[in-house]
Image (cartoon, rainbow, N blue to C red):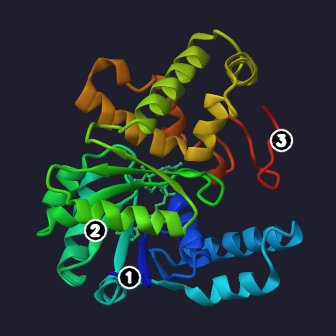
Amino acid sequence: MTIENITVVGAGVMGRGIAYVSAHAGIRTTLVDISEEQLRSALNELTRLAEKAVTLNKLSESAANELFSKLHTSLDLVNAVSDTDLVIEAVPEKRALKKHVLETVDQHAPSDIVIASNTSTISPTELGSYTKRPEKVAAMHFFNPVHRMKLVEIVKGLETSRETVQIIREVAERMNKETVEVNEFPGFVTSRISAMVGNEAFYMLQEGVASAEDIDKAIKLGLNYPMGPLELGDLVGLDTRLNNLKYLHETLGEKFRPAPLLEQYVKAGRLGRKTGRGVYDYSTDGEVVKK
Ligand SMILES: NC(=O)c1ccc[n+]([C@@H]2O[C@H](COP(=O)([O-])OP(=O)(O)OC[C@H]3O[C@@H](n4cnc5c(N)ncnc54)[C@H](O)[C@@H]3O)[C@@H](O)[C@H]2O)c1
């Protein structure tokens, strides 16, 4: 089956990035959200991204025009999925919400198409059970920022067919990504490690082991990570990080108990770059202004 149309559900941090690489791959892409504001903000951000790529000679003017001719937005999920070749779900990491969205997609999308989820942690078997086509459901886990990060983790559920894995792999390759195939375990490979390190950094911040800057600097320069765990948390979104940790705590046990300081930041609305403030302050053009 040739994939010519992709519907991405959720236009947040990840969905907009996935829509960008999908349209860039020449695939007609519809980005769906319940919020008009999110769709507007996604288009603004993607326009800035493409303009920057053109300035840096990474994208030609005509390729940028072609990209935006392939990219559409919609507030109507039912209509968007009724004629599509692949759905990639990227709504927040909340099981009840994913269940609702996947049930709706399953009901209205053609019965032979694959439904992929960008979940960071949730079992693809469980996601598949929300549909009547579990063999056509898998996790297709992109990384942030999507246009720059090379990896897509493909995570199989109990019923996921070889054909489904193959379809997802081919689409990921068209988007210029490398893939790894992972068996189902909560948090897969990457989210499990990332959540553990990020949570530990929050415990250290809470205990006063070092300042946020010095924790990040130590991990970058001492352990050769490209980003510190606290700045990465701000990029991911602290609410997303907390949701991931809650799920891993529930499924894998005590070692994933979320740091109280992280819970406090989320309660205060300090969600990271997307709200202008997390561990660091980004109130001036997304740059760190105060640490
Ligand atoms: N943020 C990351 O770095 C990252 C990395 C990999 C995977 N993920 C996963 O990707 C998924 C999305 O995360 P995010 O960070 O993009 O979240 P986000 O909060 O930035 O965006 C989620 C979007 O979904 C929309 N939405 C909510 N309910 C909806 C519905 N019923 N129908 C359509 N849209 C709806 C919201 O309006 C919002 O725009 C989560 O499963 C998360 O675990 C996140």
Q: Which one is closest to the eye, mark 3 or mark 2?
A: 2
Q: Residues within 10 Å of mark 2 (few under 14, many from 20)?
A: some
Q: Residues within 10 Å of mark 3 (few under 14, many from 20)?
A: few
Is disc 1 in contact with disc 3, using a CB cutoff of under 8 Å?
A: no
Q: Residue at (49%, 81%) from the top-left corner? A: 29
x then y, percent, for residue 141:
43, 52
Is the residue indicated by label 2 positioned so its CB lies within 8 Å of ligand 1?
yes
Kind of residue at badge 1: Thr
Question: Which label is found at residue 101?
Answer: 2
Earlier-in-chain disc, 3 versus 2? 2
Q: Which one is closest to the eye, mark 1 or mark 3?
A: 1
Kind of residue at badge 2: Val
Question: Which label is found at residue 289?
Answer: 3
Quarter placement of the C terminus:
top right
x then y, percent, for residue 87:
35, 73
Q: Residue at (45%, 24%) from the top-left corner? A: 260
Is disc 2 in contact with disc 1, using a CB cutoff of under 8 Å?
A: no
- Compute the Cα span from label 3 to label 2: 38 Å
- Compute the Cα span from label 2 to label 1: 24 Å
Instruction: Quadrant for residue 25, please give it.
Output: bottom right
Earlier-in-chain disc, 2 versus 1? 1
